Each structure stands twice: as structure tokens, then as C-alpha cells.
Amino acid sequence: MRLFFIFILVFLIVHKQTAQVVTNNGGFIKAQAGAFIRVNGSVENNNSGLITVNGDGTAASAQVFVSEDITNNATITADGYIKLVRHWFNNSLFNYGLSTVFMEGANQFLGGSVATTFNNLTLDGTGVKTQQINKSAVGILDLKNLELNTNIYGFFQLNTATTAIIRTAGLTGGFVSSANTGFLSRATNTSASYLFPVGSTANNSGNTPGTGTTRYRPIDLIPTSTVATSYTVRMANVNATTETFDRTLIAPTICATNPLFYHQINRSVGLADATVTVNFIESADGNWQGIARWNITTPNLWQEIAGSTVTAGTPFSQATKTTWNNFSATPYILYNIKPTVTVTCADICPGSTTSVTAVPTPSGTYNYAWTVPSGFSPNPGNTTTFSSGIGGTYSVVITDPVTNCVSDPINCTFAVTQNPSVIFLSPP
């Protein structure tokens, strides 16, 4: 059988100017460990045919290189390497064993009518690898520096190891993108950080690769327990309003939400709480103060996730909510707080003064704009407190100089009252 493959190799090299189709119509083809098979063309496995790629999951295994498509309509069993320059179409049974499938071409499809479960899947070559059906991995998904577009489907990483998805480090490393309803899923069973390396090169819900601003904005999830759980994540590289999550519908505590992108995060299996972290780049995305979610308690409204905080960093700042358990709706977005302010003052007697004091929430550095009664001098300017002996209404608006969020005006009023007097009357 090994000599049979050597004959194929020689035949195809001699005829390398014309692409071939190797068709297995019900036969048995085996590549023994250590063999290298090159097909200058496509492979079709039909009519109960069986193709076996033997090995132990390492480079010492059989290696099959196909310069065009693989179409499986029967059974492929693999413990070795399958290297593919064009498309993968699985319409029947793929026994993944210890195998690694390498997508080594330019733009390639992961298609067929049957969802494939891979052992290891490695993205190589160039371009975008696009799913046409759900796909899964039980070993390693290696993105390298390329884009896996799940389209409207899901990619399910079933390996619960935190290292089960790897990529070239940095902002130019690989990532998973998805159209609306698509996602990256990870199974978890430990209380450690699971990276969801999501991004997009499109600014539309269909996630048409290369049609927009490229953003890599990963999510980190740390389950709070070892209970078997699965989470799904999609980075929507669009204004949330375009996908029906209207950014003008905000709770009174919110000043603004991120117009550039939002995330869809779901707990699809299990009950484990999780620490959720949204990574963003302040210089490109703006300054944000926390995470908001659609429909926490009120339908059709963005509401702040109480207790979410932001830590500045390079290249990513991180918006984090610890021990989050409300996964009833999937949209999450970065938001800024609408500041509030209170003002205190008190009535006085003639010739006295009172302190007019503004107290902002949350505490921080703000710009203060005062409106004061006629006759008050000097103008209080940009200050939190001052003294006055002129009665009337004092109103203030505060502005966060970083986010440009502005409070509603608030005021206090005091009066200058007459000094008390005593009148002594003689008895009649």
C-alpha cells in the first residue's frame, strides 16, 4: 500500500501542470506513519470509502498534502497531519483521532453538510478561514496571526484547558470574528482565565472580512468554580444601535455608551458565575468607566453593571465585573457614568455669610459652572465651595473633563433674614 502512494506521488508530480482529482469510490486508502503524500489537486472520498492517515499526532506521523479541496462523503480516520491549500467540505464521518488539520492556503472555507469536530486545527498561510457550518475542536485551535470567521455559526472549543486556544501574541495576532448570531464557544472546568480572542475586520453585521476598521478586543472570563460550564462570545464591530440595541435608550445613571463596538456574551451551559473583563484601547476607543448590559432589570434599556470598574493599561485597559451571574441577555457595552452633584447652603442674618458647597458623585476631578444671583461678587468660577452673603438661588453643573459627561443642574436657595428684635411693653 505504501508503494501505491509512492506511485500516486510520482504520477502527480509528473502531471503537476494540471490539477487532478483523486477519487476514492468505496476503496480503502491508508497512509502509514512516516509517509508523505502530495496530491496536486483535490481529494473526494465517496461511496463508503475509507481514508486512513496513520500516526501518533506528531510530525513523525503520515502527512497528506492536498493542493486543492478535500470533500469527504464517506469516512476519514486520521491520527496524522492533513495539510490543505483550499477548502474542507465534510459531508459524512471524520474520526479526528490524534490528527491536526492545517489550513495552509489563502481564503479558505470550512464547509460541508456535517459539522466537523477536529482534534487540532491550525490556521496557516494567508487570508481568512470562513465557516459554512458549525465546527469544533477537542485539542488545540491555533490561530497564529490569522482570522477565523465563524460567519453565522459557532466554533466550539471543547477542550477545557485554558491553553486550548493559542495565537501569535500582540495586537496583530490571530482572532475569531463572527457575524450576528455567530460566536466562539469555550468549555470551562477550572477557576482560571479563559481568553476569548475575538475581533473583526468588518463594520457590518454580516462580518464581511476586510470591509471596515480592524479591531481586536478580547474578552477574559474567569469562572468562579470548577463546575462544567460553557460561555460564548462575539465581538460586534458595529454601533449596537444597528443591531437593534438602541444606544439612546439608557438608564439615568449612564452618560454615554461606546459607539464603535459591543460584545455578545452568554453562558450557554452550566451555572458558574464568572469574572468578566472587556479589553479596550483608550487611545482608539475612548475613555470608559465600566460595563453596561442590555436588559438587566428593565426591557429595552442599557443599564450599568453595578460594581464594574476600569483599570488603565497598555495596550489594553480593562473593564471588569467580578462574580457576575446574570447572563439572561447577551449584549454588553462600555459606558460612562453620568455624574451627579448636590449643593448645600443655609439661611443667614444680615452681615453674615454662608458656605455654598457642591459635592459630586462619583468623587473625582470636575469642572464646575455656577449660576449665581445678581449682585454676587466675585464670581465663584471653577470651584467646589465659596462663601456668600447675597441671598438667592445658586445653581451648578459639573463636567467630567475626561469623558465630557455633564450632570443635570442642581441648586440651593438661601435667604438673608432680619435680625431678631425684642419689644418691651409696659403693663397697662
Image (cartoon, rainbow, N blue to C red):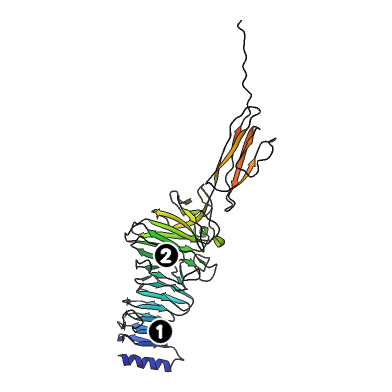
The percent coordinates of residue 233 (x first, y second) are: 43, 63
Query: 93 or 235: which is nearer to us?
Result: 235
> x, y (%) of residue 44?
37, 83
- Crowding at label 2, few (<14), some or many (≥20) Cα neighbours within 10 Å? some
User: Residue flagged by tag 2: what amino acid is it?
Assistant: Leu
| Res. 43 image quadrant | bottom left
Left or right: 218 as drawn, with respect to 286: left
Q: Secondary structure at mark 2?
A: strand
Q: Amino acid at mark 1?
A: Val
State the count of labels.
2
Q: CA distance from mark 2 to mark 1?
A: 32 Å
Q: Is residue 301 above or below residue 281?
A: above
- Say which residue label 1 marks: 66
Is residue 312 visible to the viewer in this orientation of the structure? yes
User: Residue 303, how many percent across, how many down?
Assistant: 47, 51
Q: Position of residue 58 (x, y in %)?
A: 34, 80
Identify residue for label 2: 195
Residue plotted at (46% across, 79% down): 125
Q: Is 301 on the left or on the right of 141, as rendered? A: right
